[in-house]
Amino acid sequence: MSADLGTTVDPPAQRWPRRPGAVTTAYPGGAEPDAAGDPAAVARASDRGARVAAVAIALAWHLVVGLPGQLAARSQLPAAPLAGAAWLLVAGIGLLAGHRLLRADPLPAAPLAGLLLACDAVVFAAVGDRHLFAAANWVWSGLGWFLLLAVWGRRTSRLLLLLAAHSAIALATLVARGVTAPADLARFAMYVYGTSSLPVAVFVGAAAIAGMARERAGTAAAALAVEAERAAAERARRDRQARLALVSAAAGEVLDDLAQGRADPGDPAVQRRCATAAARLRRLIAESDDVPDPLLHELRAAADLAECGGLAVDLVNVGVPPPLPVPVRRALADPLTTELAGARDWARLTVVAGPDEVTVGLVTPDRGPGDGSGPPAPAVDDEKVDHVYERDGGIRWTQTRWRKR
């Protein structure tokens, strides 16, 4: 028997470069996974909120703070068109970065960071000496947020490096224009601290929150796994106890009769009872084996035992049965196992399976009308399994059938 096992493997999704404490936020097709699935998914869901906040702050600051300051001083700027073009370019970069971050698509960090630093240098050159520390020089307060977007999900050191480059451009401009008085340098230090600390705090805080979410979700998942293992162990214990009770019921009565002298070992009826109990024991033992086709395995175990007693068994299997619960397999196999134990000369065992139906049939020679045996009583009463028993003096035909309902 064979089964066609097909597995579809999705191509690996592109992901953010990892950093300690960073959150990987790229998903196949841009779709966020279910956060309830694993700790990493919980961390990604937590990171999404921080991404939304960072994008909103960057774009709002650029529009509400940067644009009015530039428009108010446009007539006083030495190169107002150049500063305006830089503002538009940074706005476009922010929209692109925000769109891709909210879709969880990876960003080309190096090109975006290079463009942003180029705009930084252009604006410092375009505003002139008078507006170096004024609102018209919007890159002081706003560019840090766009640098944060460009390197989101990467190491904190990359953001610090970009902010240091941003500060270096500002300091080089001050030195080149001779704005090096102690008050100017103090103002420069205050601007660097004030405009860099908040983006760094948001960046580090988002990573810390996502890390805590991942840790707590991992703890919860571990607790659930322990509980699942405990439940599985308890279920296995109950199954073992149920199987032990079935085994005791299968052989205990006949063994007790033999021990008490109420049964004669030479009596053919007693011999058939012993053979039936042995076949049922063999099937119950095979029932716990981990095999691809448990039903066929259990029937084969009963057939092997019958063959050891000299019976020629022809086992035919057609089709692959669907997964069947243990009670259904018992209801399918037990009547045939009982009949097979009392068969003589030969037996033909047939299993015909489909996705919605499984039929097991047994044909054996009839032992004659005076043998005193009737149709085998099913050991398990399952309303989903039909039992058919017929005899015509030449052969006996026993059939069990399960249909999906």
Image (cartoon, rainbow, N blue to C red):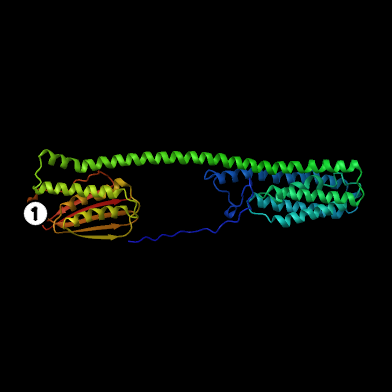
Name the side, left or right, on which 122 lies relative to 109.
right
Q: Residues within 10 Å of mark 1 (few under 14, many from 20)?
A: some
Which residue in the structure is indicated by mark 1? 368
Visible residue check, residue 370: yes
Total number of numbered labels?
1
Q: Residue at x 60, y 56 (%)?
A: 14
Return the x and y of residue 317 as percentages of the image width and height.
28, 60
Visible residue check, residue 146: no
Return the x and y of residue 148 as percentages of the image width and height.
72, 48
| Residue closer to the observer: 308 or 287 | 308
| Residue closer to the observer: 157 or 318 | 157
Q: Residue at x 27, y 57 (%)?
A: 351
State which quarter of the image contains the N terminus. bottom left
Q: Residue at x 17, y 52 (%)?
A: 341
Name the side, left or right, on which 301 lies relative to 49.
left
Asked where in the image residue 107 lies, by quadrant, the reply is bottom right
Return the x and y of residue 6 as percentages of the image width and height.
43, 60
| Residue closer to the observer: 259 or 281 | 259
Circle 1: element type: loop
